[in-house]
Amino acid sequence: MTNFLETERLIIRSWIPERDAEQAFVIYNDPEVTHFLGKASLVTSVESQRQRLIDNIEQWHRRNNGTGSWAIVEKETTTIVGTILLKQLPDKDGLPTQDYEVGWHLRRASWGKGYATEAGQVMLNYGFNVLNLPVINAVVKPENHASIRVTERLGMKPIGRTNKYYGIELLLFQLDAPEE
């Protein structure tokens, strides 16, 4: 998905490294945002953020399976409020599994406004209706109560704790494709 999707308040579009690096840096240089993402998510400069965006875009193009990571843009202000992703979950060694996850990272100023749920719903629809995925997962650190609430609002079922992905213990949530 390279073009954008829209909701009432949001535009979901591809990252544009030259234009978006500064706003992405604000998100990923915030320790409160990266607290649940791990130290590898923290960036140290706008230039390193720009390169990370470029590398991620190239990685998604190589996979060529419709998955990726996109900017969430607030329509009213054109501010990037976060990232939405739909991708294959990695196993404990970082290798892709056959399982797919929806995920979100939002800048702190955008927390609590329903943006993660709104963008998450768009990604679930995309995953089920365009990619024809039978099941979409979400994995959340047990102490990340805000993301747990997002999975609940998205109608995802709690499955329990798992060590299958990312090499750490996470809570697993699933949603089956709607029946036609």
Image (tube, rainbow, N blue to C red):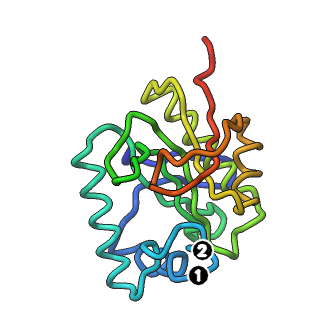
Horizontal and vertical percent position of residue 2: 37, 48
Task: Give 99 or 25, whichever is nearer the viewer.
Answer: 99
Residue occupying image coordinates x 34% and y 54%: 94
The alpha-carbon separation of the residues under discs 2 and 1 comes to: 6 Å
Horizontal and vertical percent position of residue 138: 59, 45
Identified by mark 2, the residue type is His
**Residue 56: quarter of image:** bottom left
**Circles 2, 1 touching at the beta carbon (< 8 Å):** yes
Horizontal and vertical percent position of residue 130: 45, 29
Kind of element beneath mark 2: loop
Residue occupying image coordinates x 60% and y 11%: 180
Task: Give 169 or 34, whichever is nearer the viewer.
Answer: 169
Q: Give the residue furthest to the bottom.
A: 45
* 10 Å crowding of disc 1: few (<14), some (14-19), many (20+): some
Residue occupying image coordinates x 47% and y 76%: 39
Figure check: 58 above or below 6? below
Kind of element beneath mark 1: helix
Q: Give the residue furthest to the top.
A: 180
* 10 Å crowding of disc 2: few (<14), some (14-19), many (20+): few
